[in-house]
Amino acid sequence: MFLLTFQLSLFKIFHFKVLKIFVIFNLYAFNHLNSPFS
């Protein structure tokens, strides 16, 4: 039972970090693509 909750919390942290990196990358790419045309 402890192992299951540990894996779940680890997955949550990992998922959150990946999501944050994805959002930052999207914002950076969006700004980078828009800057030459603005």
Image (cartoon, rainbow, N blue to C red):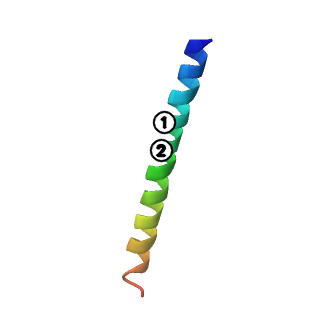
Crowd around label 1: few <14 · some 14–19 · many ≥20 (10 Å): few
* 32 lies left or right of 9: left
Which corner quadrant of the image does residue 3 belong to? top right
Could you say whether the residue bearing mark 1 is in a helix, strand or loop?
A: helix
Measured as percent of width and height from the top left, residue 5 is found at 59, 21
Q: Which label sits on residue 32?
A: none
Quadrant into which the C terminus falls: bottom left
Image location (x, y in percent) of residue 14:
48, 36
Query: How far across and how far down the image is residue 37, in percent?
Result: 41, 85
* Residue occupying the point 50% across, 28% down: 10
Q: What distance separates the C-alpha of mark 2 from that of mark 1?
A: 6 Å
Question: Considering the image in quadrants, where does the N terminus appear?
Answer: top right
| Residue closest to the far front | 2
Residue designated by label 1: 14
Q: Which of 22 and 9 is in front in this view?
A: 9
Residue at image position (42%, 58%) is: 25
Element under disc 2:
helix
Q: Which of 3 and 37 is in front in this view?
A: 3
Pick out the residue farthest to the right: 1
- Please name the residue shown 36% across and 82% down the image: 36
Whether 31 is drawn above or below 2: the answer is below
Tell me the amino acid under the disc marked 1: Phe
* Badge 2 amino acid: Val
Mark 2 = which residue?
Answer: 18
Quarter of the image where one finds residue 9: top right
Q: Do the residues labelled 2 and 1 touch (CB within 8 Å)?
A: yes
Taking depth in this image into account, of 12 and 30 the one nearest to the observer is: 12
The residue at the point 40 percent across, 66 percent down is: 28
Classify mark 2: residues with Cα within 10 Å, few (<14), some (14-19) or many (20+).
Answer: few
27 is higher (above) or lower (below) than 33: above
Q: Position of residue 13 (x, y in %)?
A: 50, 36
